Image: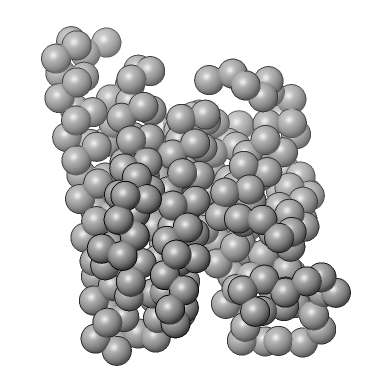
Amino acid sequence: MPALPAVLLRNALAGAISYAGAFVWTRVVSRLSTSGALPARLARKLSHITTAPFFLLTWPLYAPGPAARWVAAVVPLSFAARIARAPSRDAFASATARGSDLHSEAGGLMAYGLAVALITALGWRHEAATYVAAAALACGDGAADVVGGAVGGPVIPLPARDGRRKTVAGSVAFVAATVLGSLGMLRMARAVGFGVAHVAKRELVKIAALAAAVELAPVEDNLIVPLTAFFATRHVLSQRWWVF
């Protein structure tokens, strides 16, 4: 086990790299949106799909031991807190807001940051549930919006959210993207030495379908979707729900 000062220094540096990477990436996407290179909706979805997976890619930088998860969780939590303090001054929220609906966009960003912080603190890098939850949030929810808007087709007979109706194509894309994203993230975790449990493909489909059903509800899906996938995965793997 490394000496305590070395552990603290490594975690502090890893946290700084995680934060800087997320900050720079959101600034790049914001600039692309404000310059007109990307439509605001596409910029919003690009950030939604990529930010959480990029954050997970920095996890091998953190030291072994229990303190690392808390340092890592502070990174997305700090983004959520920053937007909560001054949503109108957040460049990304302003650049990607739907029309004048800045508060709605800021609320979604805060929920996204809070969700990533929660699954980081609850599961961390050695638990399969963390990666499945991240896939549902980033890949599944992002694909549902992109495919649903592009393909259209039959709508699901539920009240519209944000002026848009959910589609069958969007929900199918949610399930497919969550399963594929989970498989990719779990493989990545094993490749860097995190001993995550195996989750059968048929179980991933069930978890993804449950999360897709929850995504249809009139709630903040950036928060409830990943938490649903997280605890459903724990249930499938017969792990206790509230253990760290």
Residue situated in front as seen by the camera: 214 or 83: 83
View extreme (right): residue: 157
* 190 lies left or right of 89: right
Image: 238 above or below 2:
below
Q: What residue is shown at x 29% (from left), y 89% (from top)?
A: 36
Q: What residue is shown at x 55% (from left), y 67% (from top)?
A: 142
Image: 1 above or below 63:
above
In the rendered image, is residue 59 in sight? no
* 244 lies left or right of 5: right
Residue 81: x and y in percent read: 34, 45
Residue situated in front as seen by the camera: 159 or 226: 159
Residue situated in front as seen by the camera: 75 or 192: 75
Residue 219: x and y in percent read: 66, 56
Image: 210 above or below 121:
below
Q: What residue is shown at x 42% (from left), y 61% (from top)?
A: 106
Residue situated in front as seen by the camera: 198 or 62: 62
Image: 151 above or below 10:
below
* 118 lies left or right of 163: left
